[in-house]
């Protein structure tokens, strides 16, 4: 591992801040998706036939000899002829599968129509897609009404007609993107236009993977008469050699045959054999179970039931598993090349298989508890999340556990499959040599062979980098994990009121403290989606909020597990620190194998110092992330005096300089005129927490004062004990034209591309970073006006905002005086040096050394 903290690498903006970010043709969407696919699309190193045998293995050899030589006679592409060519193309594709019997695809022309994100709850925050053609699942057809235009209403409630159709991604097994000219083939070329063509394929592939729980998916890229098959998984994509399907359609027919005759599973190659779609019988059973569990509005819980799935969850190393029905999606990481985390509400399927194969209830039926299931594709260089839960369970007694979930069952499906594959595959020696410790890093012991893995490569663990480039790139691969936790939760944005939000955050901070101080586990990804509200009225848990998703965590060495809890070495020990071990550590001072040097986090909630780079991720950075989570909720889900445009300006995605400036501008300027009326406890918490964050922000005029557990928890406890909390002051976010979700998926992680990152140059003159002149309005003056504004109310706040400090908001400021207040006012105390410098002061940033080049 490099001695330098990992710089940010390109990620797609999975969580937009502004409505324009959702538009597929917008700058944010285009730029972030280009970065998402850059460097992650590989050529297959062999002929098309080998591509089929290695990546599209089939259970029944293709021996068709039907006459298909004239299948595409009606397909006549060319400049300006793309749309007229679609009927001939579709007819040819359907002719190729005519002899497939009950495994036949049906191809449909969908050009000019759009499809929204697969899950309605999150659709408003993701761009629509425009597949040119699609195919049904083998042996099925898609009803005509699926291709009818959706009846949608505008903000005024008036019906509007657009190009979005009713077709759901769950009804689609394969898509194609068509260009009428060969020059539009993007794969041997560079440039923004060709990158956008690849992005269209990638966006559709992402939707297919998420909608159907696929392990890998295939899309067709058709350019005049040349065709590429592109295989996508959650680590990268592999492109087949081009074939001329009009001149010789047999290879394309062979691909379609292979795709519809998988070695494992019963639908297509890439399907997950441990997953099946839900039926009406499943829905009836789940509805009864929810009623028995005391759920009041069952219909609301099952609104998107058929977008769920039944999944087998492994437990132990003997191949045993337990079936669970996932009926409601709580959270989704919508990035393509990522962990692709999905979080579900789930029920254990306790039904037994009857004589005719149908599922029947046990008599008497066992009690069923609602749980949470998580699926994710972890990077092989990271510890499995189950290891962190095991450490937490071993080091924190149940009687002390608060603000933390507990593992019920689950495991790494990828490692289980690789162990079976290693015993039987002739390819294993090539791909496991020197990489076994990465592919099998869990301490699972020897797994019984069970059913042999007869695939060329496992599917629950990716091999795309190793196949497309070289086994030395194995560290870029991902492994499929699935597990169930015991606490039932709902998104924190669905709180009853702001007091419940603050309570849930307080409990999550307590859980964070227990994980670190008792078990040596540092979370490192405190974000909106990773904090849930306990959703069990009168349940067994004594806390109201909890922290989950430890996939990006770090923990002290395993040897520490043999030491008494009080003697655990905290990772902050290499430098002189305060009693909480919270001082910032330069990456050069950290041990070479310190996992916390890998920069991770969800971009909008990352601490300013982490965004600046060259520091080890420590406790106080996570505590700052709790602040940005709180602020995110307040600007989106409460009534305040800021316009939507002003509120959106607090969080900027993509450019680190802009993002850092926005956060510092908020702390130094915007906070002084922000007000949530009739909620003095919340405003006092926000202002006091902001003071702590600002004191911990690096600047040239004073040593930062890191956040501590005691200081932060004291603010929360004081606020919760104060009177004056409203009963119902949480609202839906309406920034995107209607009530929307606020869950964020834009992870920032290691730069594993091995591409040099140029250090940003400094901007502006030296005068821009000098302290302001003596006549600059001080914090003390503004604090006095601030207290008066809060007492007057929101209408006068707007009127008073014009008198706020003007000029360059990013000048370094020395402040004096204090802000004090009594009951019902906002108070700040203490004096410190305030800094609002920009990220341009960062220099000399190095890229991370590839694992294969490390000694």
Image (tube, grey):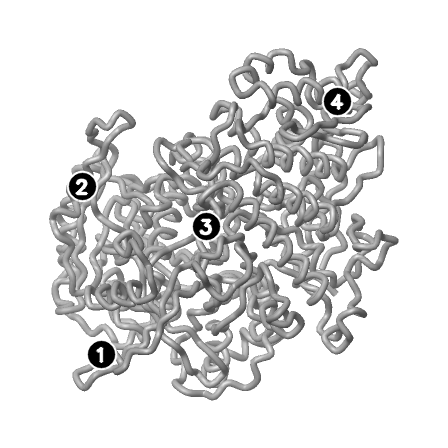
Kindly indicate the quadrant of the structure image that contains residue 352: bottom left
Residue displayed at 22% across by 32% down = 162
Q: Which residue, given by chain and number where applicable, does mark 4 sit on? A: 779
Residue 220: x and y in percent read 31, 52
**Is disc 4 in contact with disc 2, using a CB cutoff of under 8 Å?**
no
Query: Distance from label 3 to label 1 (Cα)?
Result: 33 Å
Q: Which residue is mark 3?
A: 491
**Tags 3 and 4 touching, CB below 8 Å:** no
Residue under label 2, please give it.
85
Pointer 2: residues within 10 angstroms few (<14), some, or many (20+)?
A: some
In this view, the residue in front, 204 or 718, is 718
Dot 4 alpha-carbon crowd within 10 angstroms: few under 14, some 14 to 19, many 20 or more:
many
Name the residue: 13% across, 69% down. 101
Query: Percent from the top left, x then y, of residue 613?
Result: 71, 44
**Image height of 347 relative to 341, above or below:** below
Q: Earlier in the sequence, mark 3 or mark 4?
A: 3
The dot on residue 360 is: 1
Give the spatial CA distance, label 4 vs label 2.
68 Å
């Amino acid at each position: 591992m490099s001695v330098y903290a990992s710089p940010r690498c390109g990620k797609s903006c999975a969580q937009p801040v502004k409505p324009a970010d959702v538009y597929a043709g917008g700058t944010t969407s285009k730029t972030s998706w280009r970065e998402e696919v850059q460097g992650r699309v590989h050529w297959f190193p062999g002929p098309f036939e080998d591509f089929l045998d290695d990546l599209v293995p089939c259970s029944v050899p293709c021996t068709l000899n039907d006459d298909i030589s004239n299948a595409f006679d009606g397909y006549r592409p060319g400049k300006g002829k793309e749309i007229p060519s679609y009927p001939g193309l579709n007819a040819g594709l359907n002719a190729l599968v005519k002899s497939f019997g009950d495994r036949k695809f049906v191809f449909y022309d969908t050009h000019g129509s759009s499809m929204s994100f697969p899950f309605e709850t999150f659709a408003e925050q993701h761009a629509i897609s425009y597949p040119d053609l699609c195919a049904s699942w083998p042996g099925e057809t898609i009803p005509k009404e699926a291709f009818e235009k959706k009846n949608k209403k505008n903000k005024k409630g008036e019906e509007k007609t657009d190009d979005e159709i009713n077709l759901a991604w769950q009804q689609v097994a394969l898509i194609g993107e068509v260009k009428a000219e060969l020059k539009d083939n993007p794969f041997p070329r560079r440039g923004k236009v060709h990158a956008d063509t690849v992005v269209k394929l990638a966006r559709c592939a992402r939707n297919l993977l998420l909608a159907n729980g696929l392990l890998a998916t295939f899309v067709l890229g058709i350019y005049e008469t040349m065709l590429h098959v592109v295989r996508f998984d959650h680590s990268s994509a592999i492109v087949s050699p081009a074939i001329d399907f009009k001149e010789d359609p047999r290879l394309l027919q062979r691909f379609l045959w292979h795709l519809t005759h998988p070695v494992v599973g019963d639908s297509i190659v890439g399907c997950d054999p441990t997953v099946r779609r839900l039926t009406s019988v499943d829905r009836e059973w789940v509805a009864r179970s929810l009623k028995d569990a005391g759920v009041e509005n069952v219909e609301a819980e099952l609104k998107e039931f058929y977008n769920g799935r039944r999944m087998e969850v492994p437990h132990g190393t003997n191949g045993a598993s337990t079936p669970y029905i996932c009926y409601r999606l709580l959270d989704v990481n919508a990035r393509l090349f990522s962990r692709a985390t999905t979080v579900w509400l789930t029920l254990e399927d306790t039904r037994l298989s009857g004589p005719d194969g149908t599922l029947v209830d046990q008599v008497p039926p066992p009690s069923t508890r609602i749980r949470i299931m998580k699926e994710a594709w972890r990077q092989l260089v990271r510890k499995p999340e189950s290891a962190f839960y095991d450490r937490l369970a071993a080091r924190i007694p149940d009687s002390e556990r608060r603000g933390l979930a507990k593992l019920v069952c689950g495991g790494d499906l990828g490692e289980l499959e690789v162990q079976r594959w290693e015993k039987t595959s002739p390819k294993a020696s090539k791909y496991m040599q020197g990489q076994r410790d990465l592919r099998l890093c869990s301490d699972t012991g020897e797994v019984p062979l069970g059913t042999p893995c007869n695939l060329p490569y496992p599917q629950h663990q990716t091999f795309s980098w190793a196949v497309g480039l070289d086994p030395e790139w194995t560290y870029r691969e991902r492994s499929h994990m699935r597990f169930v936790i015991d606490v039932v939760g709902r998104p924190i944005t669905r709180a009853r009121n702001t007091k419940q939000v603050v309570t849930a955050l307080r409990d999550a901070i307590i859980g964070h403290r227990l994980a670190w101080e008792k078990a040596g586990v540092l979370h490192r990804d405190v974000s909106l989606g990773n904090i849930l509200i306990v959703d069990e009225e009168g349940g067994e848990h004594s806390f109201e909020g909890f922290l989950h998703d430890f996939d990006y965590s770090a923990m002290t060495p395993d040897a520490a597990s043999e030491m008494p809890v009080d003697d655990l070495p905290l990772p902050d020990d290499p430098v002189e620190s305060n009693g909480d071990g919270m001082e910032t550590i330069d990456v050069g001072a950290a041990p070479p194998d310190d996992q916390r040097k890998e920069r991770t986090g969800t971009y909008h909630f990352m601490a300013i110092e982490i965004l600046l780079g060259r520091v080890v991720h420590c406790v106080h950075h996570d505590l700052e992330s709790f602040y940005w989570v709180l602020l995110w909720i307040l600007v989106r889900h409460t009534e305040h005096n800021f316009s939507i445009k002003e509120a959106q300006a607090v969080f900027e995605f993509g450019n680190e300089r802009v993002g850092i400036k926005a956060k510092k501008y908020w702390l130094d300027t915007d906070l002084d005129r922000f007000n949530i009326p009739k909620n003095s406890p919340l405003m006092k918490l926000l202002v006091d927490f902001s003071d702590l964050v600002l004191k911990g922000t690096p600047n040239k005029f004073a040593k930062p004062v890191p956040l501590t557990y005691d200081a932060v928890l004291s603010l929360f406890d004081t606020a919760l004990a104060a009177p004056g909390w409203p009963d119902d002051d949480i609202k839906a976010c309406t920034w995107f034209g209607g009530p929307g979700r606020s869950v964020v998926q834009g992870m920032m992680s290691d730069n594993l591309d091995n591409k040099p990152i140029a250090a940003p140059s400094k901007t502006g003159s030296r005068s821009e970073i000098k302290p302001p002149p003596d006549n600059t309005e001080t914090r003390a003056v503004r604090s006095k006006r601030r207290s008066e504004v809060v007492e007057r109310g929101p209408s006068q706040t707007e009127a008073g905002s014009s008198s706020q400090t003007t000029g360059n908001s990013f000048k370094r400021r020395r402040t004096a005086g204090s802000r004090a207040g009594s009951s019902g006012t906002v108070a700040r105390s203490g004096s410190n040096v305030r800094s609002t410098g920009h990220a341009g002061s960062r220099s000399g940033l190095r890229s991370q050394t590839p694992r294969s080049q490390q000694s």
